[in-house]
Image: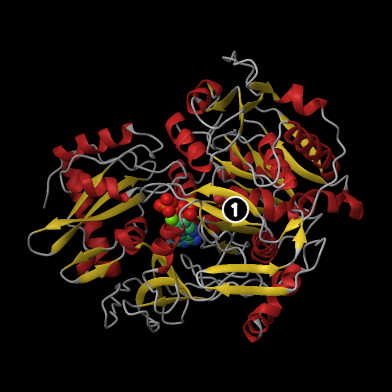
Amino acid sequence: MAESENSSGALSALSTESRSFPPSEEFAAQANATAEWYDRADADREAFWSEQAERLSWAKKWDTVLDWQPPFAKWFVGGELNVAYNCVDRHVEAGNGDRVAIHWEGEPGDSRTITYADLQRAVSKAANALAELGVGKGDRVAIQLPMIPEAVISMLACARVGALHSVVFGGFSPGALKARIEDAEAKLLITSDGQYRRGKPAPMKENTDQAVEGTSIEHVLVVRRTETEVPWTEGRDLWWHDVVDAASDQHTPQAFDSEHPLFILYTSGTTGKPKGILHTSGGYLTQAAYTHDVTFDHKPGESVYWCTADIGWVTGHTYIVYGPLANGATEVVYEGTPNTPHEGRHWEIVQKYGVSIYYTAPTLIRTFMKWGDDIPAQYDLSSLKVLGTVGEPINPEAWMWFREKIGGGRCPIVDTWWQTETGATMIAPLPGVTATKPGSAMRPVPGISAIVVDDSGTQVGNGEGGYLVIDKPWPSMLRGIWGDTERYKETYWSRFAEQGYYFAGDGAKYDDDGAIWLLGRVDDVMNVSGHRISTTEVESALVSHPTVAEAAVVGAADETTGQGIVAFVILRGGTAADDDAKGDEAIKALRDHVSKEIGPIAKPRQIMVVEELPKTRSGKIMRRLLRDVAENREVGDVSTLADTSVMDMITSGMSESKEE
Ligand code: ATP
Ligand code: MG
């Protein structure tokens, strides 16, 4: 056991990982970024970001790179650009109009191929339609759509006319949509008649109609997707195919200020009332394009890129819409769920389009592991070159599985840490430079500075854990919380006010080589006999046992130790735990395994085998609800859960389970 604690006891660092995978020589030789970038960026940060901003086409160049009045930043001050022009038109003007921008794959098996020239016409039509509906600079547009091309087109059309979009995930309830429409005072909603969900059309407009009632919404623009009958309010509701299709496909984009707001996005709600995170134009697009280029080693015209996120999350904004399209990427957009109509759907798509960059979430990787190795083995995945993950800490075992079973042992994996608030990737390896360790996001990308500090804001040493902070402003940083400056200051800037650090809310540690490991949310940290233990390390220890597919741990009140660790585990396909005697043995084996991997202090007091874990709609485990179960409390607010029945299942199982 390698345990070390820093003086302030911020967070223990328990696990050690010695495996390390350098890029191959061939990969390194052709990589977009080299090791020298770190030094160049450190030597003159503003000059470095200025160089990155040159990736974009500016109608007017900036006068000043950064104006920093903590905690308020302005980037590329005085510069002017049109974000949609950068993502679409300039590629057509450069002679790449015939390049495929989007290979769209519908859930029922229909598909569409959209070139940059097609995209330019589509976005221009939509922009003209918005203008006709009176939507212009500074107006807010709510978008609730499935993963169809019109979602991307709508976002770009808003950007083109200077309106802010507020995209709301398609699975959110009318109440959640209404709260977001009201908070942003949106005047237009773009939605669809229905959406495909696991092979069947499900209603959409019926729900959005409830959300729109009594709000500032003047018009609802409806895309036809499932051909289901929908309720209709004359005068308010308009079909996309009437209004947009009839509009001209010629539209001249106007340049906006670098700090002109681009969008509002409400965080997914793991931790409470959603916050409307505000992003602006020049700095955001610069960091989106730069990180997409260097962390994925993207080659325009060659790479086939696929980010599996939904556009309802920030990952969909930055790495489906703005980053890749600014870079002239050819990308796959998939409408459906990964097991419709079968569990090999993703690999079938990789094979069909020759996907070379595949970016997904750890929760999905663990699900693929659960479904079994034989599924990806049936497909040709040899086109893959780079793999990426985002959303949660990735357990080393899941990382290894991803590397071997999907990447054929040859693809660098980039574990990218970032948040809705940071706008783009902050901590990640460079695939052609960094020797990666399974489960570590490694180090900040060139140009970014982030450190791990103790309670007093002092940087901790190698082998020590604490709080992740960002100690220098960055181009794609949030510019505020919509309509609530106080909450912005309080949430992110008050914890380390003296030092002026941005507090990310995540725990992290340095390993003995100084690589950064994310340890989950600070709010989830467990306190066992005075040791501050991260959920991530115990969960990864559990997942490293061959029988475990997924694990979630929480600290529950304990008379002797302050808190005791309670673990909820999902077993891998093929592992049986029905037999009681065998079940007890299996649980003892798991407890011993954790003790052996990271030390007796982290041994779970209790382990429960479950079928499912409570997750947000973006696939993150909601430990707060499991804490309620572990402490026998009534389960709290479940409205942001993807599947609310999961909690009933777990609660009833819990009352039957035995404690040690
Ligand atoms: P809310 O703030 O409403 O609770 P959220 O934090 O889940 O929602 P996001 O901004 O989508 O919304 O998620 C960012 C968080 O996801 C990070 O703060 C971190 O906890 C986690 N995260 C993202 N990427 C990684 C990663 N590569 N490794 C570890 N954790 C990650
Ligand atoms: Mg968050």
Q: Residue at x 22, y 61 (%)?
A: 592
Residue at 57% from the left image edge and 26% from the top image edge? 196
Q: Quadrant of residue 599?
A: bottom left
Q: Residue at x 66, y 84 (%)?
A: 44
- Residue closer to the observer: 185 or 545: 185
- Quick check: 5 left or right of 122? left
- Which amino acid type corresponds to the residue marked 1 in the rendered image? Tyr
- Residue 500 sits above or below residue 625 on the image: below
- Ligand 2 location (quadrant): bottom left
For the question of whether residue 117 can be seen, the reply is: yes
Q: Give the SS element for disc 1.
A: strand
Towards the viewer: 320 or 440: 320
Give the labeled residue for mark 1.
359
Residue 519, position as x, y percentages in the image = 38, 65
Query: In this figure, which colouring scheme has been used for the structure?
Result: secondary structure
In the rendered view, tell whether residue 39 sits above or below residue 305.
Answer: below
